Amino acid sequence: MKLKVSLFQRMEDVVDKWRKEYKSVLESYGEQTIADVKVSQVLGGMRDVPALVCETSVVDPYEGIKFRGYSIDEVIKLLPKVSDFPYVLGLWYLLLTGEIPSKDEVEELEEYIKIRERLPKYVIEVLRNTPANTHPMTQFAMAILAMQRESVFAKSYYEGMSKRDLWKPMLEDCINLIARAPVIAAYIYRRTYRDDVFVKPNENLDYGANFANMLNVNDDFVLDKDFADLIRLYLILHSDHEGGNVSAHTCFNISSALSDIYYSVAGGMCGLAGPLHGNASSESLRWILNILKFFNGIPPKDKLIEYINNHLASGKVIPGFGHAVLRVTDPRYTAFANFAKDKKLDSDVIKMVRLLYEVVPDILKATGKVKDPYPNVDGHSGAVLYHYNLKEYDFYTVMFGVSRIMGMTAQVVWARAVGFPIERPKSLPIKTIVELAQKGK
């Protein structure tokens, strides 16, 4: 097909550029020190230690996420659109190449992906032989791992392909995974939560709308155009967030051992499943619904403030607020808020999100203990899904996973293209850390 030639040729050009840059940096600055590391960072989850490389996105504390240098507003404005929102695969093209694609290039990619989306029968069998009440993220990771037997990368490696060319079969695997991920996710959703009637992919729909259609959240087999727009936006906003978060770094680290994308992404999905990472959206929504239940509806502002203060006094945190890097309202939160405003969403759960935005930041600021008192993406993402009748919280992480696969795959293709080595940082016992710290005084 024509796309394979054009996409791979474009990648050939950018790969050559990446390699020259990578080699130049190593030769020019390889022995230079770029940062000191504090004991508090070593013992604090390596927070803010500049020890990883990520070209696909950067999170600025005051501007938020930038995909290949483009802000969320710029991405939504510049990427080719299928409705009021861009084609989701246009974002993947940007993450892969660093370039804004033309509409023809995105539509070509959309068509190529459709050819790859058919699920192998054995994947269906793996899922059907798993208890239906198994956590959806477990099912998702299992299905991804099951497809490892088809890895073009693994086959090419064991056949002796030069490491310089391994990015090509890696990209082939990534295309297959990108194509099948929403189909797998929708199958898990219909099997686990609904009537077990699977909605087949529709070749007339774009990637985002097709996922929305397969979910069939209202069980009416009618595509809600606004819900399709939401899914397009959701998949774009959750696609990438630097390389140091748990899921992205796990995937990248596994791939550094020259594991294929199925092993790597399956590991990343297991990291994403944690309540401090991909499951945070569910935690935030549960908290919002508990407030609505406690007050039997939207509470008066003064009563909500009292409720939140009591919540904090009990030693608990407020889900959906604060971020490890950001020091402003998460632009992804703002994008969802603007979507809700433009679509005139007015359910109680959306109203509650707006009310929390009015009161929580000031309460957190008053404590004097919070670096970032503003809402993050999880403070809104679950609420909009819930509004559109996707109310099964445990599935939200799978939604996140379908999106994050775009960032993971783009990062891994880059790593194979430049020949990034296996990761092997140094670990130390506490005793040695103390000794080094004392010498440094």
Image (tube, grey):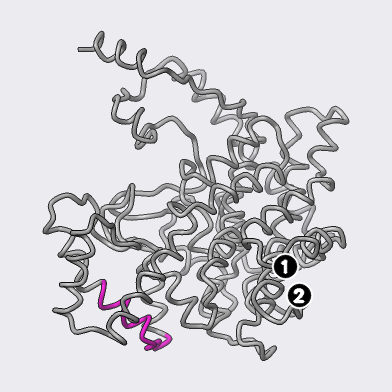
The residue lying at 35 percent from left, 73 percent from top is: 288
Q: Is the stretch drawn in magenta largely helix, strand or loop?
A: helix
Residue under pointer 1 = 183
Left or right relative to 222: residue 353:
left
The quadrant of the rendering that contains the N terminus is bottom right
Residue under pointer 2 = 201
The residue lying at 29 percent from left, 29 percent from top is: 40
| Vertical arrangement, residue 87 with respect to residue 239, above or below | below
Answer whether labels 1 and 2 touch (C-beta < 8 Å): yes
User: Where residue 106 sits in the image (x, y, percent)?
Assistant: 66, 65
For mark 2, give the secondary structure: loop
| Vertical arrangement, residue 68 with respect to residue 305, above or below | above
Query: For the residue marked with disc 1, what is the amino acid?
Result: Val
The quadrant of the rendering that contains the C terminus is top left
Q: Crowdedness of circle 2 by 10 Å Cα count: few (<14), some, many (20+)? A: some
- Tag count: 2
User: Where residue 196 sits in the image (x, y, percent)?
Assistant: 74, 78
The residue lying at 72 percent from left, 46 percent from top is: 262
The mark nearer the N terminus, 1 or 2, is 1
User: Where residue 255 sits in the image (x, y, percent)?
Assistant: 65, 36
Left or right relative to 185: residue 224:
left
For mark 1, give the secondary structure: helix
Q: Name the residue nearer the viewer: 118 or 350.
A: 350
- What residue span does the magenta drawing correspond to? 343-356
